[in-house]
Image (tube, rainbow, N blue to C red):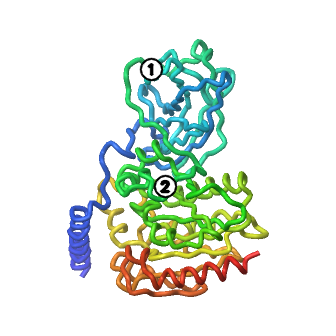
């Protein structure tokens, strides 16, 4: 009997493997290029051979130029491991001096190099600063899923004579580095090329490359107007602000202003939620808005719910009285469960999308804060989310659930949905103080 049970388990595993491999071949899911989001074992912490070796945490900081140099600055992370001669990751500071480093778990020193001669090359004699004091680097340790913020690096041309890179790290030759193009709170039209589906796909399959160029920020469709209520739209996997064109083109722009959280959708969902919280906190501090609505599609609904439950913006009074989710797979995907038992390199987000993942369990077990009203929209012909869109743990806490004759994607351009959407929007945000 025991032998029969063992054979049954092996047969089931083999069957699941065939299904899983079919998904991989047919849909390109659960596989990433070998050179993206995977680092060498040198960044693993000593004595911990199981430490993650894919990019899984973010360091956010600012570069401050003491000599007010108008030149591009590169921030590099050097792993604290014996004999390492390669940087673990790099990021260009944007026009505001902000940098985002997307790194594996580990310990690092941060150095800054500034292109003072404007030749497009970062060189050893252009070391402009480091994270630390008295020209001595201060080690930074990060764990999987961490978001460290508030780091400052002061730069000056004179530092090149006092600061040295670790032995073996060399910037004397021509090297290509991706440039940072955007910043939080930037005003961009919804049809901007940065939001193209091709670039959004890069955020899913090569999130490290996306993070270098675009980071993870909130973009405004127009200059901020304190008389209008912000509506924050959160896309799902391989999504971008382009997904929201139908709805945004029909909004009452005299009352509402659309904002978009644009992030690499291949990253871990707790990290995406942390980045959303940080960027929104920064905008709230700068702009002082009183209330807003959050609208999310597909996996973006899981990210948004995690943000709302983990990071209440105000314990006494929420800035987000309304949350609407469209076609969200609340229960996750069985294929993602299989991905965790078959050896392969998987896209980081799939760790969180399994039906038994810690993220799914924690996110649905956490109740939305008082004062936030949640409405669920789902497509009756949605084959991707399927029954996961009606998980009772999410439905039971929602104010109401609406079904429409549409698919996972056409739900974003359904006329009946938009009429309901508009009525809820006006009713709930008018009632919110």
Q: Is residue 229 visible?
A: yes
Figure check: 53 above or below 130: below
Percent across and percent down for residue 248 are: 51, 68
- Between the residue at mark 2 and the residue at mark 1, the CA separation in whole angstroms equals 31 Å
Q: Which quadrant is the C terminus positioned in?
A: bottom right
Q: Which comes before the other along the chain, label 2 or label 1?
A: 1
* Residue at the image position 27 percent from the left and 60 percent from the top: 28
- Label 2: few (<14), some (14–19) or many (≥20) C-alpha neighbours in 10 Å: many
Vertical arrangement, residue 433 with respect to residue 73, above or below: below
At 54% from the left and 24% from the top, the residue drawn is: 114
Residue at horizontal 46 percent and vertical 67 percent from the top: 245
Picture quarter containing residue 348? bottom left
For numbered disc 1, what is the local secondary structure? loop
Return the x and y of residue 192 as percentages of the image width and height. Answer: 45, 53
Image quarter where the N terminus lies is bottom left
Q: Is residue 351 visible?
A: no
Q: Residue placed farthest to the front in the image?
A: 254
Image position, residue 396 (x, y; %): 57, 86
**Left or right: where 249 falls relative to 138:** left
Seen at 76% across and 70% down, the residue is 317
Q: Residues within 10 Å of mark 1 (few under 14, many from 20)?
A: few
Q: Relative to 316, is 213 on the left or the right? A: left
In the image, residue 231 lies at what x, y percent? 60, 67
Q: Which residue is mark 1?
A: 119
Q: Is residue 9 above or below residue 34?
A: below
Q: Which mark is residue 263?
A: 2
Q: Depth check: 348 or 241 in front?
A: 241
* Viewer-side label of 2, 1: 1
């Amino acid at each position: 009997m025991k032998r029969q049970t063992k054979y049954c388990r092996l047969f089931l595993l083999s069957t699941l493997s065939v299904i899983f491999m079919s998904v991989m071949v047919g849909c390109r899911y659960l596989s990433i290029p070998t050179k993206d989001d995977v680092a060498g074992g040198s960044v693993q912490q000593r004595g911990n051979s199981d430490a993650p070796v894919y990019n899984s945490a973010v360091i956010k900081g600012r570069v401050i130029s003491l000599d007010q140099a108008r030149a591009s600055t590169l921030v590099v992370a050097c792993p604290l491991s014996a004999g390492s001669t390669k940087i673990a990751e790099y990021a260009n500071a944007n026009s505001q001096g902000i940098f985002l480093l997307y790194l594996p778990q580990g310990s690092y020193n941060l150095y800054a190099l500034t292109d003072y001669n404007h030749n497009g090359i970062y060189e050893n004699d252009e070391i402009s600063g480091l994270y630390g004091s008295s020209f001595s680097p201060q080690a930074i340790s990060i764990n999987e899923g961490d978001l460290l913020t508030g780091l400052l690096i002061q730069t000056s041309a004179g530092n090149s004579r006092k600061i040295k890179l670790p032995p073996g790290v060399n910037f004397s030759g021509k090297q290509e580095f991706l440039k940072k193009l955007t910043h939080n709170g930037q005003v961009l039209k919804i049809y901007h090329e940065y939001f193209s589906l091709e670039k959004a796909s890069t955020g899913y399959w090569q999130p490290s490359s996306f993070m270098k160029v675009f980071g993870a920020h909130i973009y405004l469709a127009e200059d901020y107007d304190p008389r209008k209520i912000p509506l924050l739209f959160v896309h799902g996997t391989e999504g971008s602000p382009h997904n929201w064109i139908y709805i945004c083109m029909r909004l009452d722009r005299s009352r509402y202003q659309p904002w978009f959280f644009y992030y690499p959708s291949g990253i871990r969902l707790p990290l995406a939620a942390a980045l959303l919280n940080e960027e929104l906190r920064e905008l709230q501090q700068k702009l002082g808005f009183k209330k807003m609505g959050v609208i999310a599609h597909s996996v973006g609904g899981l990210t948004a719910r995690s943000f709302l439950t983990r990071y209440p913006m105000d314990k006494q009074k929420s800035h987000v009285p309304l949350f609407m989710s469209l076609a969200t797979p609340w229960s996750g995907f069985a294929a993602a469960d299989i991905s965790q038992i078959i050896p392969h390199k998987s896209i980081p987000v799939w760790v969180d999308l399994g039906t038994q993942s810690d993220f799914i369990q924690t996110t649905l077990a956490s109740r939305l804060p008082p004062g936030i009203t949640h409405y669920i929209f789902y497509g009756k012909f949605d084959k991707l989310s399927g029954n996961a869109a009606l998980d009772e743990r999410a439905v039971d806490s929602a104010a109401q659930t609406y079904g429409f004759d549409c698919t996972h994607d056409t739900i974003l351009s359904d006329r009946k949905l938009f009429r309901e959407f508009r009525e809820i929007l006006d009713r709930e945000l008018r009632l919110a103080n």
